[in-house]
Image (spheres, rainbow, N blue to C red):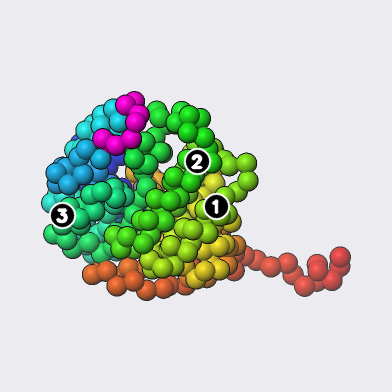
Amino acid sequence: MGDYHVHLHPHVPRPDSPPPGVYPEDYVDAFVETALSRGATEVGFTEHLHRFVDFEPAVAGFWNVGPRADLTEHSRTYYYDDLNLRLDRYVAAVLGARDRGLPVRLGMEVDFFPAHLEKMTAVLRQYPFDYLIGSVHWIDAWSVDHPAVAYEFERRGVRRAYEDYFGLVADLAESGLVQVLAHPDVVKKFGHRCPEEPVDLYRKVVDAARRGGVAMEVSSAGLRYPVGEPYPSPALLRMSHQAGIPITLASDAHYPDQAADQHMELVRYARAAGYRHQLAFRVGGAAHLVALPDPDAAAPTEPTSSEAGR
Ligand SMILES: [Zn+2]
Ligand SMILES: [Zn+2]
């Protein structure tokens, strides 16, 4: 049972964060130790594709689309500020942890840049990833989950933002690019909600996920942001379960102390939507279902005598 969405480098370093692109062994190990202490049994590392210089020739310029110069400029600046990792070092760090006997998997959080898929895939093929998760972080030039440009929700309208976002998630699900849809409704991150829950958009995503054969990620990251709810929402997760779509569990940790954050709460959340299994990935990429534990099964039950006394 894994935490299949973990980053090794934060966007905002802390005093104890290593410099970008540097992977001290004890720092990598700290993520795994914390995750194991919280009930996860594997850690899948999934660094952001857009942070690796190796992908720059494939994706740079993705922000040059749409009529909004402010969004284009924000994304261009953000991209280059965060462009400070190298694929060979990242892969070596994760494979090194595996060689030390740690239960880790090599993954990547792949941004969905629809116009750049062919070139992205050519780079991805050069490394032995066990699995890939896919994320919609950008709607054209708009960095939809970045607080500095959250004003775009007002300009565009919340419902329209959701339509644009879930349209891309559905395309991602059927793209063949990834095995998992990461934080499937991250568009709610800052608490922007449609007047009515957009089940019509959920339906499109669920149908696309079924056709595309991808899993839905259940992530505790939403609990750390203003929305205060895991991704995906209970309704989207129930619909996914009814459609037979598998799940992974995830923290989206960017610091060691976030590894497998709220892991057992996520297990409860998934079980409440009907799930009894999660997807796991073997080294080399084969996916298989493993049972979700019942975190409450071992809880002491009321003695029969006190029951009888009521
Ligand atoms: Zn993400
Ligand atoms: Zn992430």
Which residue appears at 33% of the width and 35% of the height? 66
Q: In this view of the protein, which residue sits in the foreground, 272 or 163?
A: 163
The residue pinned by badge 2 equals 160
| Disc 2, SS | helix
Q: Quadrant of the C terminus?
A: bottom right
Label 1 and label 2: CA atoms lie apart by: 18 Å
The secondary structure that dominates the magenta segment is: loop
Given the image, on which type of amino acid does mark 2 rest?
Arg
Label 3 and label 2: CA atoms lie apart by: 33 Å
Residue 3 vs residue 200: left or right?
left
Given the image, on which type of amino acid does mark 1 rest?
Ser
Q: Is residue 272 visible?
A: yes
Which residues, given as a range, are shown in magenta?
63-70
142 over 118 or under it: above or below: above
Q: Is residue 271 magenta?
A: no
For marks 1 and 2, give the one nearer the viewer: 2
Which residue appears at 30% of the width and 31% of the height? 72
The residue pinned by badge 3 equals 123
Q: Which mark is residue 233?
A: 1
Label 1 and label 3: CA atoms lie apart by: 33 Å
Q: Position of residue 161 (x, y in %)?
A: 47, 40
For marks 3 and 2, give the one nearer the viewer: 2
75 over 137 or under it: above or below: above
Given the image, on which type of amino acid does mark 3 rest?
Val
Q: Is residue 91 visible?
A: no
**Which residue is most to the right?**
310
Mark 1 CB within 8 Å of ligand 1:
no
